[in-house]
Image: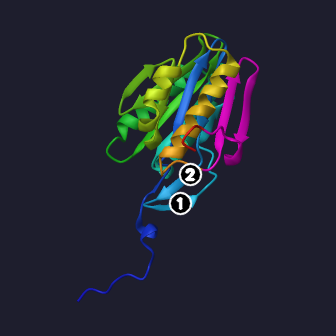
Amino acid sequence: MLEESSEPGWLSEEVKTGTTIIAIEFDGGVVLGSDSRVSAGETVVNRVMNKLSLLHDKIYCALSGSAADAQTIAEMVNYQLDVHSIEVGEDPQVRSAATLVKNISYKYKEELSAHLIVAGWDKRAGGQVYVTLNGLLSRQPFAVGGSGSSYVYGFVDAEYRKAMSKEDCQQFVVNTLSLAMGRDGSSGGVAYLVTIDEKGAEEKCILGNELPTFYDQ
């Protein structure tokens, strides 16, 4: 007769960001946002993880999937971009960062379980948002990802407008995250925002009790 393990089940579960991530372009920059909950199975193992990872001074990525895999990809790209910027003597392009993420994701698609949205600003093309998944590289005006994204596709499709201001984009991101965190059990905690433009990156954390509420909350 097999002995039952006395260890809690979550110790053998893969740690996943099980998340909601979003990025959107505005005239002159981008806004990225994410929730902060990290889970292993049905257990929340971290309530305040920042899933917006710095790739370079004006380039960030939003992480989803396996926390370890996503962080590893981000760290590899961060290192390669630092070396690249020293070699060429200028800041890297956002598309270059997204291409690196795409190449790593495709090369190790059988071993890694992660989806990264890459966004940032460069002097050649301004604010840009790229989705990368299993070899895909596509620039989009906005992108959502993670387990909470399926709850908010209707909202973002209905609320998105072309040529939104920076402030409108920030509110759009906050509203989307708040709705997803209210519906998706794997999303929650606080909301992290990063706004990137020609001047640099500005990070912000919005506590759960400061997030907007909607009719059913």
Query: Is residue 117 found left or right of 191 in the rendered image?
Result: left
Mark 1 secondary-structure assignment: strand
Tell whether position 154 is magenta. no
On the question of residue 135 being in view, the answer is yes
Residue at 53% from the left image edge and 60% from the top image edge:
44
- Residue 93: tell me if it is visible: no
Asked whether, in this view, residue 136 is left or right of residue 23, the answer is: left
Q: What type is the residue that disc 1 sits on?
A: Val
x 57%, y 42%: residue: 75
> Can you tell which quarter of the image residue 29 is in?
top right
Which circle's residue, 2 or 1, is located before the other in the chain?
2
Dividing the picture into quadrants, the one containing residue 138 is top left
Q: Which residue is mark 1?
A: 44
Q: Total label count?
A: 2
- Quadrant the N terminus occupies: bottom left
Q: Where's residue 204, x and y in %?
A: 73, 37
The location of residue 10, given as percent across then percent down, is: 45, 67
Structural distance between the alpha carbons of marks 2 and 1: 7 Å
* Residue at image mark 2: 37
List the single residue furthest toward the left: 1
Mark 1 neighbour class, 10 Å CA radius: few under 14, some 14 to 19, many 20 or more: some
Identity of the amino acid at label 2?
Arg
- Mark 2–mark 1 CB contact (< 8 Å): yes
129 or 36: which is nearer to us?
Answer: 36
For the residue carrying disc 2, how many other residues have a C-alpha within 10 Å: few (<14), some (14-19), or many (20+)?
A: many
Q: Secondary structure at mark 2?
A: loop
Question: Magenta stretch?
Answer: 189-213
Q: Is residue 165 left or right of residue 182?
A: right
Q: Which residue is the extreme one toward the right?
A: 199
Compared with 64, 46 (above or below) is below
